[in-house]
Image (cartoon, rainbow, N blue to C red):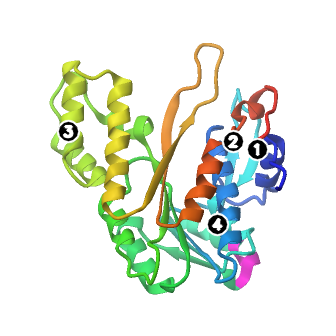
Amino acid sequence: MARRLTSTEILAELGSEDDGLLKRSIGPWTLEKLAVLLLYIRGFADACKRVGGVYVDGLAGPGLCETGGAQVERRVVMGSPLIALTTPELEHCYLLEKKEPEKAALERRAEAFGGRATVLKGDVNRDLPRLIGAAVEPWRPCFCLLDPEAAELHWATISAIASTPRTKNKPELLILFPLRMSIVRQFPTTDVLKPAVRLRHNRTFGNELWESIYESRLSGELEPPDANRKYLALYKKGLEELGYAYVISKPILAPRTAKRGRQELYHLVFATDDETGYKIMSDVFKRHYDVGLISGGQMELPI
């Protein structure tokens, strides 16, 4: 059995030189998400190397990220597109980005990987399902990352990806579900829901069932942690109803501070039909990632 990498080794492998092009500014907690992605992509690529797996990124960004600030050590690390591109066992990487400056930086960075990279300008909700259906051969294993910054990802997009005609399994999905980071922040605590907020959440969940959870929270019937668990369960149930055999999740927490413990920010939700993919991601989700290591020398633990 291969030795597990330590947090230091994971951070070293995520690290990159600053090429002077546009970078995405990230919080330190994002390193845990990137660690999960790094370890899973390697496992996915190895498991399907005989037929050649395909990676699809619906909100790709510029390719490099940077942490920094008064409390955090500055680091330049690979974003999701470069994590995938530096995994040579992957057959191809399709990288979709809506913003022109980010797309231009990603194109420059992807040049080194030649024909294995396709960088496209497009909107995740409008263009991604069509891209997967047209570009990814139905017999190839496909892993799709959906990593919104807030609530811009629509459930209709997820549903369309899940229904992409395939000869075997549906595309695997790793979704950032921005529960406390975005969704619950938009709920008023004393006023009625505005139509725009209701529409936004209907698009996120794909139904209106979230509203009964919100009303129970507003009336005091549910405490915030209980309501949050129900929102997450509703989202995961939706993926199961799309036909995914395995749906699991992992909370991503902010680093501990002197004034408070680690606070939940969002969840990574993984959906697959493949038992091997489920086993790999279950192991990756269960590992310990020492986020505190980057900001002041907590003791490192193996992951």
Asked which quadrant contains residue 219, the reply is: top left
User: Which numbered disc flags the more N-terminal residue, 2 or 1?
Assistant: 2
Local SS, label 2: strand
Identify the residue under disc 3. Answer: 211
Q: Is residue 110 magenta?
A: yes
Identify the residue under disc 2. Answer: 67
Kindly identify the amino acid type of the residue bearing the numbered disc 2: Thr
Q: Position of residue 77 (x, y in %)?
A: 73, 52
Q: Residues within 10 Å of mark 3 (few under 14, many from 20)?
A: some
Local SS, label 1: strand
User: Which numbered disc flags the more N-terminal residue, 4 or 2?
Assistant: 4
Identify the residue under disc 1. Answer: 75
Q: Are marks 2 and 1 in contact (CB under 8 Å)?
A: yes
Viewer-closest of 244 and 153? 244
Identify the residue under disc 4. Answer: 44
Q: Is residue 201 above or below residue 157?
A: above
At horizontal 38% and vertical 41% (from top left) the residue drawn is 232
The nearer-to-camera label among 4 and 3 is 4
User: Which numbered disc flags the more N-terminal residue, 4 or 3?
Assistant: 4
| First to last magenta residue range | 109-114
Q: Are marks 3 and 2 in contact (CB under 8 Å)?
A: no
